[in-house]
Image (spheres, coloured by chain):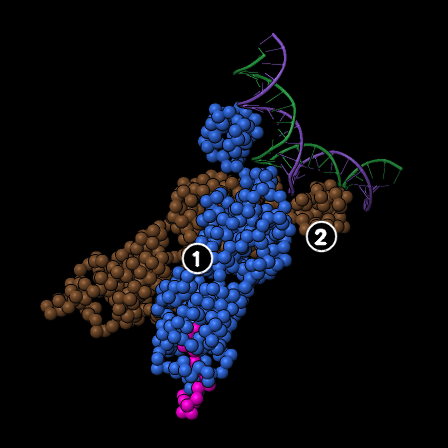
Chain colours: A blue, B brown, C purple, D green
Amino acid sequence: MTITIKDIARQAGVAHTTVSRALRGSPLVAAETSERIRQIAAESGYRPSAAARSLKTNRSQVLGVVVSSLDDPFFSEILQGIESVTQEHGYSLFAAASQHDPQREQKIVQAMLEHRADGVIICSTPFSAEQAHHLLEYGRPIVVVNNQAAEEYRYSIYHDDVDGSQQVTRHLIDLGHRRIAYLGNASSGRTTLDRLAGFQQAMQSAGLPILDGYLYQAAGGGPADGLAAAHHFSGLMQSQAADLERHSMLQSASLLPPTAVVCFNDMLAIGLLQGLSLAGWRVPQDISIAGFDNIVFSAYTQPPLTTFDQPKRYIGAEAARLILELLQTPGGDMARWEPKIRLLRGRLLPRASTASPDPTLPSPSQEQRWRGG
Amino acid sequence: MTITIKDIARQAGVAHTTVSRALRGSPLVAAETSERIRQIAAESGYRPSAAARSLKTNRSQVLGVVVSSLDDPFFSEILQGIESVTQEHGYSLFAAASQHDPQREQKIVQAMLEHRADGVIICSTPFSAEQAHHLLEYGRPIVVVNNQAAEEYRYSIYHDDVDGSQQVTRHLIDLGHRRIAYLGNASSGRTTLDRLAGFQQAMQSAGLPILDGYLYQAAGGGPADGLAAAHHFSGLMQSQAADLERHSMLQSASLLPPTAVVCFNDMLAIGLLQGLSLAGWRVPQDISIAGFDNIVFSAYTQPPLTTFDQPKRYIGAEAARLILELLQTPGGDMARWEPKIRLLRGRLLPRASTASPDPTLPSPSQEQRWRGG
DNA sequence: ATGTCTATTGCACACGTGTGCAAAGAAAGG
DNA sequence: CCTTTCTTTGCACACGTGTGCAATAGACAT
């Protein structure tokens, strides 16, 4: 049925071992013989069995990628970056989505171990340490991308989210905003913390307080979550606007609506933008909104979204290159390889969703009267 | 190093073949023995070698998926649908992006053949018949999703794009539109043709002409292509508006701007929406825009996009189920299996980007004076 | 001619798993 | 007690490939 090197050997009148050598390009076989064998192999449509080779060489030429969801526009772009590099180097890609489900995670790791993937790239933000341990125990190198616990892994590529989040926040501050809120995503592990930290640090170093209710954590990181969060901010703005009106007669302003919102990512920002627009708020006139990641669609909202351009494809490509490099190093004890952590930085991408706050709104000089968060 | 059934056999005091049987759940082994073996296997963290098993059984438990791009929001959702089903059934997924590049396609097919993927799902719209032939020749069943030449393949899942496109067009006609343009995507094979055909049929059966310049094919199917196409339609509208003004004094209107545009997909529509908005046109007051696919972000544009909801995840899941079903059937001659083509239908999703045309625009009674396309 | 070296090839075995067949033991039936 | 049948286990071999080692033959020097 399927033809093997033995078939070719028979046809060429040599031993199958000579065929094996010829096709692998070994110098141990005469040029003439080699040529003849290659000829026959090509004509017969011979396809070497990866299984047999893998069994013998302990190399599967397969890399695993774990991602939380395959249809996440952020991860899928990273995935594409990984794929383009691995394909170029003759490795195949094993893609699996954990869906934030420990049981699926477990099955994925099991499958990758059984297939003896040469290495695994983990993009899934929350990934159980236990499963990772299983992989390492089996000698499979792991490269982690933007993970919650980059320090726990020896090899990782990650984006400096703290810096990025700071830049975004500072951008708003530079525009003149003083009352800036933050819309987070509770379920993204390390990234959750880093971006929030960046926001808080930028606010603090500018001497700005984070007011009550200005920190809101959505349950997920999709546009629907952003839309839902709009209710929170919208309510906040309305009640505070009402408060403001009431109190303005008393020359006091203990509650004020935010003039800008920094979002955990673009998808949340897009949902929020939609929600606030529906509620009648104008962006950026009434409120500025900034996202993070620069997913493709962030450029096509109305108004286009100010965001932080994370080099997603490049991050994926770097992760792939790193793991390929690890596979080059002459085996030995994996634990003795030196750790390698690569920190990448993106750039701020100011677009039309952020602008200076309306000067007719309460002036910054009143700041000290607001309640701190 | 890595532990095998022989190690377990030694520890259990049996032959490795008994271990093999026990772990595979063969009834040929005593319950007690079986239990003991499973115990040891679990404790020792034994992972069966997929390579060895594949070699022996001719089953790799691997399915291949070819897609044109992994970060396409449409395909990645289908991919997620596929993955969720295959994972549930213990199959692993080999994902690869062809990028419309024949050479990559060739490498992908090569890799999948070498890994002896049990079956392949092709979502990449343009896929070389030659490569497909290689797969079939090797006995690998192929299931095709929304492909250009569904009839050429024995197994396919596809969406009734003709019907969908008709529905979208009719929706606009029902709203009162008479001058409707079409923004296509030249590079999507079968889908390109079907959606255009649906548009044309709906127009024809309503007795409406397709005017000169109203059919525009973009080079690709991304938002950037839609944005670029906006120049075309915007120019069309301006020049025609100018023409209209000139001619209105003569009570004639040989050239009129479209009041609606049907787009090949949501991404083009989103780009077009952006472009026309930038050019100062209001949607849907000045012009209605409809997309196709119902990608996540189509709900978050301003205004939200009227589109056709294609059940992407379901399509992917069905494709996976179909190929798994094929793998169940007792081998034999693949050519004798009966073909199976599954046609799915989505539903129209009217949103705010389409509305009745402005009644102050030229009335439908003037239709017969327009130049036909 | 003999010995040495090199180039080329084949043999034997291994990788980890699964299966047909025989063997051994136990149970059942006479 | 013997024969038959069933249950349980082991042996031998196969899947397709790669590699250490020996074998052969030719080239070259002595």
Mark in front: 1 vs 2: 1
Mark 1 sits on what residue? A311
Dots 1, 2 in contact, CB < 8 A: no
Could you tell me which chain the residue with mark 1 belongs to?
A: A
The reply to whether residue B197 is visible in this rendering is no
* Residue occupying image coordinates x 47% and y 64%: A163
Neighbours of disc 1 within 10 Å: few (<14), some (14-19), many (20+)? many
* Camera-nearest residue between A42 and A370: A370
* Camera-nearest residue between A309 and C10: A309
Horizontal and vertical percent position of residue B153: 42, 46
Distance CA(mark 1)–CA(mark 2): 43 Å
Q: Residue furthest left?
A: B250
* Residue occupying image coordinates x 58% and y 56%: A153
* Camera-nearest residue between B275 and C6: C6
Mark 2 sits on what residue? B43
- The amino acid type found where label 2 is placed reads Glu
The reply to whether residue B358 is visible in this rendering is yes
Element marked by disc 1: loop
Query: Does the magenta-highlighted stretch encompass residue A14?
Result: no
Residue B95 relative to residue B236: left or right: right
Span highlighted in magenta in the image: A245-261
Element marked by disc 2: helix
Horizontal and vertical percent position of residue A219: 52, 70
